[in-house]
Image (cartoon, rainbow, N blue to C red):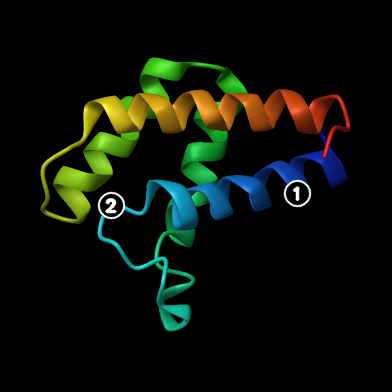
């Protein structure tokens, strides 16, 4: 995946992390919009590898190591699946 599609996927990952994953509950605070943006590139790499378990594992690691909260494994797997659906949609030029 290259160029415009890669940028679109990165944008969608950032949005999913903020609006859907949101483990610390800040998605209703406009000032916190960039809260998870620093994780987007790393998650993008796992999405490009199409490894659901690694995506979910890394999300859990971010929760425990970076945020000091308990990992929500089932939600993280759901987020991983959602991110993969976005990847396939971007690849197919679906909106």
Residue drawn at the location 28% of the way across and 52% of the way down: 23
Q: How many labels does the image show?
A: 2
Q: Where is residue 37 in the image (x, y as percent from the top left)?
A: 49, 60
Per the rendering, the mark at residue 89 is: none
Q: In this view, does 53 lie above or below 60?
A: above
Q: Where is residue 76 in the image (x, y as percent from the top left)?
A: 33, 32
The answer to whether mark 1 and mark 2 are in CB contact below 8 A is no
**Which residue is tagged 2?**
23
**Which residue is tagged 1?**
7
Q: What element carries label 2?
A: loop
Residue drawn at the location 56% of the way across and 32% of the way down: 83
Q: In this view, does 38 lie to the left or right of 82?
A: left
What is the crowding at mark 2: few (fewer than 14 residues within 10 Å), some, or many (at least 20)?
A: many
Q: Of tags 1 and 2, which is closer to the observer?
A: 2
Residue 1 makes an appearance in the image: no
Residue drawn at the location 66% of the way across and 32% of the way down: 86
Precedes in sequence: disc 1 or disc 2: 1
Q: In this view, does 54 lie above or below 35?
A: above
Q: In this view, does 50 lie to the left or right of 95?
A: left
Q: In this view, does 8 lie to the left or right of 21?
A: right
Distance between the alpha carbons at the discs numbered 1 and 2: 24 Å
Image quadrant in which the C terminus is located: top right
Q: Is mark 1 on a helix, strand or loop?
A: helix
Which of 75 and 5 lies nearest the eye of the viewer? 75
């Amino acid at each position: 995946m290259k160029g415009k599609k890669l940028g679109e996927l990165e944008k969608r990952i950032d949005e999913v992390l903020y609006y859907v994953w949101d483990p610390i509950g800040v998605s209703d605070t406009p000032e916190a919009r960039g809260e998870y943006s620093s994780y987007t590139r790393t998650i993008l790499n796992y999405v490009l590898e199409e490894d659901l378990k690694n995506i979910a594992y890394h999300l859990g690691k971010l929760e425990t190591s970076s945020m000091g909260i308990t990992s929500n494994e089932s939600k993280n797997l759901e987020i991983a699946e959602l991110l993969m659906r976005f990847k396939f949609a971007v690849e197919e030029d679906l909106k």
